[in-house]
């Protein structure tokens, strides 16, 4: 008499899953999940590649040799990290860094400090001419800076003798920026007025209410205008060209990069390395602050 070994149900299920290749851990199932992910995110992947590939090209070219950078090869034969050292050794490059940090840092600080009280007044105070003041603020956003550049230059150069410096660009930011005021005002309108009224009931004045209640709740909006202003100052080329062109000691990175490119017109590897060093701070700042930036921009404009 022959004996048969009983086959349990779990063993049969495991054997079928292993043999047919349709189990959740099989190669066919994994390929199906990958293809489904690509199909769902294909547009996002294509758009991401359009943004990433230029940065990849700049980086790869920056670590090539002089001969290879002009040959059209896309991948470095050897990685020349000394190109970045050569860029930093360029006369004036560190001064351009310092000037850009001063311009962007002070410009951002002055803009934020001047925009907060004006935006708070336009958002919460009720006074005669409030709408007219808001219209005037918005109308200044429509005025191109090129229209007033000549009279402003004459004022700063002849009356204050500040030509050849960055102060004609930094000082006006202490008196408010129309776009920052408008953006922050729209954000402050989303803060429930009950918080402000309860603070006043507890004995807080307007200034204390602004500093203790409004500013902490408006951090995303403040971060948004701060990032906008920092990016503007860091990338500004027109302003330094007008006021600081005659003094190389006051050049910023955006303006100095043009001089660097002219001096190294045949050294595309060094030009790309310098370009990457100019872009790196902006990319890093946005990468670490993107959550607050997106939240601040998204929440503005909810109320009019």
Image (spheres, rainbow, N blue to C red):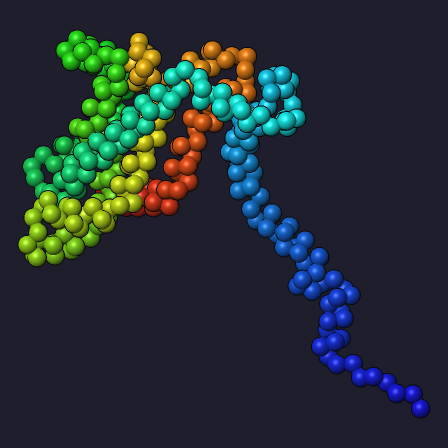
Residue 186 location, quadrant: top left
| Whether residue 140 can be seen here | no
Q: How many marks?
A: 0
Placement of the C terminus among the 4 image quadrants: top left
> What residue sits 68% from the left and 58% below the top?
29
**In the picture provided, is 237 more to the left or to the right than 188?**
right
The answer to which of 131 and 207 lies nearer the viewer is: 207
Quadrant of the snapshot with the N terminus? bottom right
Residue 87 in sight: yes
Indicate left or right for 245 with 140 as reference.
right
Residue 225 at x, y = what percent?
A: 28, 36
Q: Residue at x 66, y 63 (%)?
A: 24
Instruction: Kindly identify the residue that appears in the image at 71 percent across and 77 percent down.
Output: 10
- The answer to which of 102 and 294 lies nearer the viewer is 102
Position of 50 relative to 240 (above/below):
below
Q: Position of residue 106 (x, y in %)?
A: 25, 29
| Residue occupying image coordinates x 20% and y 14% | 162
Residue 223 on image: x %, y %: 29, 41
Where residue 302 sits: x, y (%)?
A: 28, 46
Considering depth in this image, is 249 or 227 the residue closer to the camera? 249
Task: Identify whether 279 is placed above or below 240.
Answer: below
Horizontal side of residue 263 vs 227, given as left or right: right
Q: Image height check: is 171 above or below 47? A: above
């Amino acid at each position: 008499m022959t004996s048969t070994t009983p086959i349990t149900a779990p063993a049969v299920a495991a054997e079928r899953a292993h043999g047919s290749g349709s189990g959740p851990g099989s190669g066919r199932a994994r390929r199906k999940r990958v293809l489904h992910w690509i199909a769902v995110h294909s547009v996002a992947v294509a758009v991401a590649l359009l943004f990433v590939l230029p940065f990849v090209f700049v980086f790869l070219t920056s670590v090539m040799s002089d001969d290879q950078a002009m040959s059209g090869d896309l991948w470095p034969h050897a990685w020349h990290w000394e190109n970045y050292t050569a860029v930093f050794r360029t006369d004036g490059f560190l001064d351009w860094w310092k000037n850009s940090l001063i311009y962007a840092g002070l410009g951002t600080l002055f803009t934020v400090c001047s925009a907060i009280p004006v935006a708070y007044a336009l958002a919460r105070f009720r006074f005669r001419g409030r709408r007219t003041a808001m219209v005037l603020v918005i109308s200044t956003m429509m005025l191109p800076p090129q229209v007033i550049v000549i009279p402003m230059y004459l004022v700063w150069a002849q009356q204050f003798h500040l030509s050849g410096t960055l102060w004609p660009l930094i000082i006006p930011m202490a008196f408010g920026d129309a776009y920052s005021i408008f953006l922050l005002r729209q954000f402050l309108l989303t803060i429930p007025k009950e918080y402000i009224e309860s603070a006043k009931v507890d004995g807080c004045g307007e200034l204390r209410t602004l500093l203790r209640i409004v500013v902490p709740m408006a951090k995303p909006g403040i971060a948004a205008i701060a990032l906008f202003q920092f990016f503007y100052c860091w990338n500004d080329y027109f302003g330094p060209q007008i006021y600081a062109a005659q003094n190389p000691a006051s050049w910023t990175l955006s303006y100095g990069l043009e001089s660097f490119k002219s001096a190294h017109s045949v050294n595309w590897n060094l030009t790309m390395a310098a370009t990457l060093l100019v872009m790196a701070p902006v990319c890093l700042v946005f990468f670490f602050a993107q959550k607050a930036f997106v939240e601040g921009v998204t929440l503005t404009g909810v109320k009019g």
